Amino acid sequence: MGKVLQVRVWASTYRDEDVEKAWPLLVALVWPEPFVRPVAGQMLGPADRRGVLELVQALDDGLRFAGWDAPVRDALADRVPAIVALRDKLDAALAEWDARTANRITDELEEALDQAEKALVKAK
């Protein structure tokens, strides 16, 4: 690795619409307005992304600041911190170039989001 050019390992969501399909209630909770897809060739900024990791951050922000109704807050109160902890573990594994561990954590993270989605169904 050079002094100027550095190699990084990262995780990203290939298709944001897959997030909407996998966890529609969580997406609607944190992003109530429909997502307008950028036109082909348009550069995406951080605010234009709605991937898995952005969903995790939005859930964390929402739990802390959004003032969700009590049933929603109660359903997600324990789950969101656990999801954020998995995201942090993923970041650490990627920083260590530990692809095997990172891959395992992505499965755990998606399962935790599945469980949060199911909890939200029951809360509504």
Image (cartoon, rainbow, N blue to C red):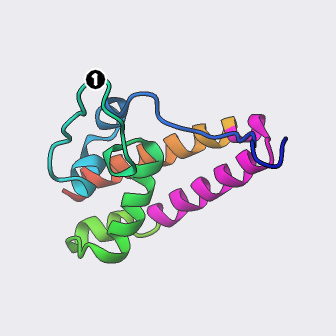
Above or below 88: residue 93: above
Q: Nearer the viewer, residue 61 or 109?
A: 61
Q: Using residue 69 as the reference point, say whether residue 2 is left or right of it.
A: right
Label 1 SS:
loop
Circle 1 sits on which residue?
40
Q: Quadrant of residue 86?
A: bottom right
Q: Position of residue 85 (x, y in %)?
A: 59, 61
Q: How many marks?
A: 1
Q: Position of residue 94 (x, y in %)?
A: 71, 45
Q: Amino acid at mark 1?
A: Ala
* Residue lying at 72% horizontally and 54% vertically, measured from the top left: 92
Q: Position of residue 47 (x, y in %)?
A: 33, 51
The image quadrant where one finds the N terminus is top right
Specify the farthest residue to the top: 40
How many residues crowd around disc 1 within 10 Å: few (fewer than 14), some, or many (20 or more)? Answer: few
The image quadrant where one finds the C terminus is bottom left
* Residue lying at 50% horizontally and 41% vertically, measured from the top left: 110
Magenta part of the protein: which range? 79-102
